[in-house]
Each structure stands twice: as structure tokens, then as C-alpha cells.
Image (cartoon, rainbow, N blue to C red):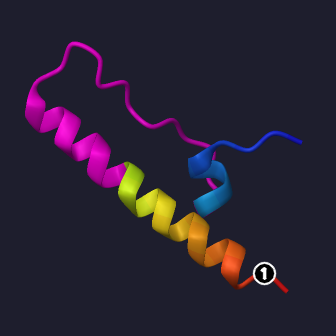
């Protein structure tokens, strides 16, 4: 079984936007999204039963 970070963290299958060749503000928003997904993933792993 293969999971994406977003799929595992939220249960939704959606892609993280590609920040390549985008403005720095776009990079910052993608980084914030990845930070949130990483935290959600950690919570999910730690609360598994």
C-alpha cells in the first residue's frame, strides 16, 4: 500500500502544490502546508491503537 503525506495525514488524496519556479510567497505557503501535514502525520502515528 502506498500513502502520500497528505493522504496519510488527512485521509484525503490531494497533491501538495508544486512550488517550482514560483514566487517566494508561494514557497512559503507550500512549506506551511507541509509543516501542518507533518504535524498531523505525527499525531496520527502517536495516537494509533
Compared to 20, does 29 lie above or below? below
Eyeballing the image, is 7 above or below 16? below
Residue sticking out furthest to the top: 21
State how many labels appear: 1
Residue 8 is left or right of residue 43, and the answer is right
Tell me the quarter of the image containing the C terminus.
Answer: bottom right
Q: Verify whether residue 18 appears in magenta.
A: yes
Residue 23, image x, y percentages: 10, 24
Residue, x 52% and y 69% (percent of image)? 40
Residue displayed at 56% across by 50% down: 6
The residue singled out by tag 1 in the image is: 48
Question: What residue appears at the point 60 percent right and 61 percent down from the top-left corner?
Answer: 9
Q: Secondary structure at mark 1?
A: loop
Verify whether residue 39 appears in magenta. no
Q: Which residues are magenta?
A: 10-33
Position in image of residue 4 (x %, y %): 65, 42
Q: Residues within 10 Å of mark 1 (few under 14, many from 20)?
A: few
Q: Quadrant of the N terminus?
A: top right
Q: Is residue 22 above or below residue 11?
A: above
Residue 42 vs residue 6, the one in the foreground: 42
Does 2 sit left or right of 42 as displayed? right
- Residue 10's spot in the image, x, y percent? 59, 62
Left or right of 4 in this view: 3: right
Q: Is residue 6 left or right of residue 44?
A: left
Residue 22 percent location from the top left of the image: 18, 20
Amino acid at each position: 500500500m502506498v500513502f502520500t503525506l497528505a493522504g496519510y495525514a488527512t485521509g484525503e488524496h490531494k497533491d501538495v502544490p508544486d512550488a517550482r519556479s514560483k514566487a517566494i510567497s508561494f514557497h512559503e505557503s507550500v512549506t506551511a502546508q507541509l509543516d501542518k501535514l507533518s504535524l498531523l502525520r505525527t499525531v496520527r502515528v502517536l495516537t494509533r491503537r
